[in-house]
Amino acid sequence: MGSKPRTTTSPALKMLDAVLERFEISSANEILVEEKGITVRVSRGGNVGAPVPMSVPVAEKVEAGESAENYHVVTSPFVGTFYRRPNPDADMYISEGDTVSVGTVLCIVEAMKLMNEIEADAPGKIVKILVKDQDHVEYGQPLFHIE
């Protein structure tokens, strides 16, 4: 029984086919592609069978009487995994209520196996941490509110 070529009509499936074709001939271990609201992540080996979020809606919960307009919002510069500490045995970088200066490390976002320290770009008090440790984050997703 020979394999039959797939006919793809949706933009998402066309993108997936193109990514898979390029991935098969490349030597890369992982590819992450984002285009027009579609995110595709393909990797070789590793966590086979582990759930991988393909797209996470960027939604910010604002408590009653609280407006994001009153705060400086620190957003994720990458798609990746959010970490509140440098390693599992270390203390958290910061907590709600802490005062930070420009350059204070707030968290790490792991993207493509690189650990990227995210620093405060404004001084003030951390009033809200919007993401849980080890959550998947999207590019531009709000991470912190600084007052």
Image (cartoon, helix red, strand yellow):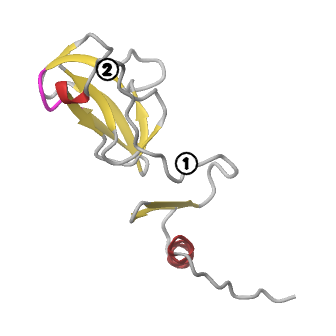
Answer with mark 2 or mark 1, whichever residue precedes in sequence: 1
Give the prevailing secondary structure in the magenta stretch.
Answer: loop
Q: How far is disc 2 from disc 1 in space, using C-alphas?
A: 24 Å
Q: Nearer the viewer, mark 2 or mark 1?
A: 2
**Residue 121 position in % (x across, y down):** 14, 32
Q: Residue at x 55, y 76 (%)?
A: 10
Q: Residue at x 41, y 17 (%)?
A: 90
Q: In what quadrant of the picture does the C terminus appear?
A: top left
Residue 128: numbered disc: 2
Q: Which residue is mark 1?
A: 53
37 relative to 50, above or below: below
User: Cβ–Cβ below 8 Å for labels 2 and 1?
Assistant: no
- Secondary structure of residue under mark 2: strand
**Residue 120 is covered by the magenta coloring:** yes
Residue 86: image quadrant is top left
Q: Amino acid at mark 1?
A: Pro
Amino acid, disc 2? Lys
Q: Residue at x 30, y 45 (%)?
A: 140
Residue 31: x percent and y percent? Answer: 47, 63
Residue shown at 12%/22% (left/top)?
123
Q: In this image, 49 relative to 79: left or right?
A: right
Most extreme residue toward the front is 65
In the image, residue 94 sits, relative to residue 56, either above or below, namely above
Which quadrant would residue 63 be assigned to in this image? top left
Left or right: 119 in relation to 4: left
From the viewer's perspective, is residue 31 above or below residue 141?
Answer: below
State which region is magenta.
119-123
Query: Percent x, y for residue 92?
Result: 37, 17
Q: Residue 83 versus residue 130: which sits nearer the camera?
A: 130
